[in-house]
Image (cartoon, rainbow, N blue to C red):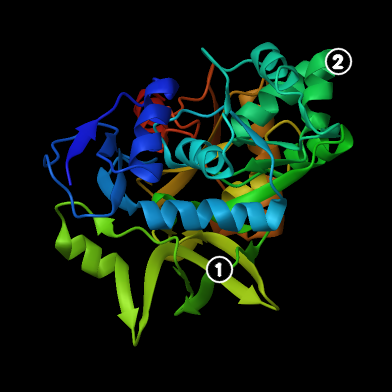
Amino acid sequence: MNLEPVDGSDARAVLRGLRGAVLGAGPAIALGGGDLPHEVPAGTAVVVTTSGSTGHPKSVAISRAALTSSALATADRLGAGAWLLALPAGYIAGVQVLVRSLVAGREPAILAGSFSAHAFAAAAAAMASSDGGVRVPTYTSLVPAQLQTVLDAIDGGDTAAARALEGFEAILVGGQALAPALAERAAAVGARIVRTYGSSETSGGCVYDGIPLPGVGVRIDEGEVQLSGPTLADGYLGDPEQTARVFVRDGATRWYRTGDLGSFDDGRLRVTGRADNVIISGGVNVSLDRVERAVRTIEGLADAVVVPVSDERWGQASVVVTAARVDADDATALVRAAVEAEIGKAARPREVLVVDRLPLLPSGKPDRTALRALAADAAAAG
């Protein structure tokens, strides 16, 4: 099957490509660039190439069967309706908004231009429709940074943004952990938030509010979260060794090794962090995901990101980076006390670094590679 590159920043072009790749006879589309072959295995619909938040590129080959299985499972869980694309179309979460629309036989609404609360509210208002006098439910998908933008506007008196959030039957929020304070703000204005967990390797979110979608299997193997089911990608294009390492077979079942740590009790998944996001500080293993969760419970620091830095005394330490308008010294003292109380003295971040804005990837996730560089530069200068 032929593979044709498509500009992921052009949502209409991505939609046209998906219409052929998912509903028609192809060709498959490539999103995210990269040096890829001109042909892919039969059944492939999309190849998503992304560096991710840690800077390691990967080209994930996803079949039309996996994409449609995910879309149908989402409809089974949430219900059918119309979707608004407010995410970049070149990433898997944006792709799935479009695929859900195609599978449902509806044209998606597309937020044009850069994301803002005003643009979001206008796009949501334009979606209002009905079938036979019955209102059509509407859905959308956001990353936490977008949700915060809308909530900030609402706090500033934007009633249109408030109506937009409240009007969606469900708002999927994924890409990174949703800070409890942000979730509480959303609930307070009537937003129905559904936390999603997944990746390109699972055709997007496949666990909603901790509960796997129909057909999705979850197991914990030596602490690692592993997923199975019809939504799994075929693997990494042109990298059979990495594919074999990450997608493993246990009898007749194929499992995706997420690299995340977690637990699965009473049918509900709880992700506790990345297996590889651990530092050794003074001989003590410290999970930076756990530190970040503790920091984000502090008022005003819901956007904070915790990154590792070298430390002459302890070997490794962590730095909290935030765009909040706070005094760095006061915030450092508050953060260190809170983390010590929650986790222990060895986990205390070294300092809080205040920046004008957090660097983000096009997907809306924090650019952790850029953040680590900022923290390292600040340490060298200080």
Side of 341 where 323 appears, left or right: left
* Residue placed furthest toward the bottom: 251
x then y, percent, for residue 74: 61, 53
Question: Which one is in front, 296 or 13?
Answer: 13
x then y, percent, for residue 311: 38, 45
Question: Which one is in front, 152 or 37?
Answer: 37
Inspect the image, locate mark 1, and give the three-letter code of the amino acid beneath it: Gly
Side of 104 where 380 appears, left or right: left
Give the secondary structure at mark 2: helix
Give the secondary structure at mark 1: strand
Residue 159: which disc? 2
Vertical placement of 167 versus 248: above or below? above
CB under 8 Å between discs 1 and 2: no
| Residue at image coords 27%, 59% | 235
| Residue at image coords 25%, 68% | 245
Which image quadrant is residue 340 in?
Answer: bottom right
Inspect the image, locate mark 2, and give the three-letter code of the amino acid beneath it: Thr
x then y, percent, for residue 142: 61, 34
Question: Which one is in front, 46 or 342?
Answer: 46
Q: Say if residue 277 shows up in the picture.
A: no
Q: Which is in the foreground here, disc 1 or disc 2?
A: 2
Q: Earlier in the sequence, mark 1 or mark 2?
A: 2
| Residue at image coords 20%, 51% | 237
**Quadrant, the C terminus:** top left
x then y, percent, for residue 22: 39, 44
Residue 262: which disc? 1
